[in-house]
Amino acid sequence: MPAATLKLGAAWMILSATGGAAAVAAVVPPVAPAVLQNKAVPSKKAPQSAMLAVTRAGPRLVASGERGIILLSDDAGVNWRQANVPVQTSLTALRFTDQQRGWAVGHLGTIVHTADGGVSWSLQLDGMRAARLAADGLSASGHPPDQKLAEQFIAEGPDKPFFDVDFSDGLHGYVVGAYNLAFSTGDGGKTWQTLTPRLPNANSLHLYAVRARGDKVFIVGEQGLVLRSRDGGASFEALPSPYKGSFFGLLLTRSGTLLAYGLRGSLYRSSNDGADWQAIATNVGNAIGAAVERDDGSLMLLTHNGGILVSADDGRSFAPHKTGAAAPVAGVAAAPDGALVLATLRGLRRQPTP
């Protein structure tokens, strides 16, 4: 098992590079780890490495994974080439706002940015700075519990991973991660501000997914946590949750429908910005860990064991199909030619759609 933060579809596993989950809370020296200072190593075997996310940047496909690997494909996922990345941390999520501008986030509080379609990347935030920003924001609240949490952020250093990223436009973006770690930007990532003090998440539950459109921001996470902002992240409210298990992902369709998915095939649909939820039958027992809306409006959900759930009615119902994937699926994108491209723990693979 790679020593990193992996989005496996069935679960997120938070592992430190030195000793597994038990070491996550250990105090680290105030020095940036080597993986935050060294560039990703070029490798011909990179397309067969553990890949954790894949997305579209116009006609181009961009994928990310272990050891800072980011790959590009301009032929619908048939061939891949490696990008220039300044870190060796695992990169768990990707988001592009157009063909040129994109962001990847991941282990050790990493945020990297590209302005050339993914060919080259620069570091915008790392866990050292993220811990300090979070601590400063908590300290400013003046509440004793926040002060204690601020001290904890500093003591633990850059150990916390980011799990997801989304942008409502080229300037306004949001990242979320472990132990209630969350940030926003209003200038395309030139500067980041902590959201942690604004989130009604007293138990510091993990935040697994974020989706934003206009001034609306939705976050889901552990124990059925559902948060919503209607003012661009200035404030958040906790919404009644339809589920007590973990939500691993959130799909916001072009129509405005929300689909929250997670453990044991759990799937819930909202057509009114999360105020009410309807349970959607999936008839699968494996967790759902990835989702995509295709150009034709059909929705695809990927289960941990490689199953596909397909909807042609905006998520009101789903029909099961099988991919035959040989490894757990962590991410999915719709290629320009209509095929699905899967990010799996054994590399990238194309899948003809049902």
Image: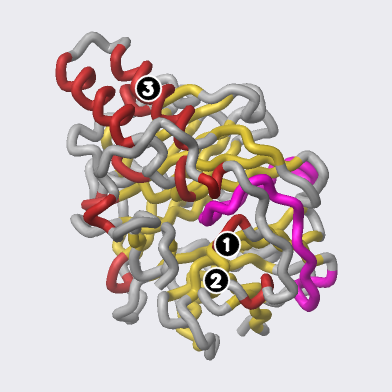
Question: x%, y% of residue 95?
Answer: 62, 48
In reply to whether residue 191 is colored magenta, the answer given is: no
Look at mark 3 in the image and give the residue it sits on. Answer: 235
> Which kind of residue does numbered mark 2 sit on?
Ala
SS of the residue at dot 1?
strand
Question: x%, y% of residue 34?
Answer: 53, 46
SS of the residue at dot 3?
loop
Look at mark 2 in the image and give the residue it sits on. Answer: 50
What residue do we see at 28% from left, 38% from top? 27
What residue do we see at 42% from left, 82% from top? 305
Residue stretch in magenta: 75-101
SS of the residue at dot 2?
loop
Q: Quadrant of residue 98?
A: top right
Q: Quadrant of residue 5?
A: bottom left
- Main secondary structure of the magenta stretch: loop
Residue 285 in view: yes
For residue 44, above or below residue 183: below
Please identify, in this view, whether the residue under mark 3 or under mark 2 is nearer the observer: 2
CA separation, marks 3 and 1? 32 Å
Look at mark 1 in the image and give the residue it sits on. Answer: 65
What residue do we see at 66% from left, 34% from top? 169
> Which kind of residue does numbered mark 1 sit on?
Gly
In this rendering, position of residue 126 left or right of residue 16: right
> Which kind of residue does numbered mark 3 sit on?
Ser
User: Earlier along the polypeptide chain: callout 3 or callout 1?
Assistant: 1
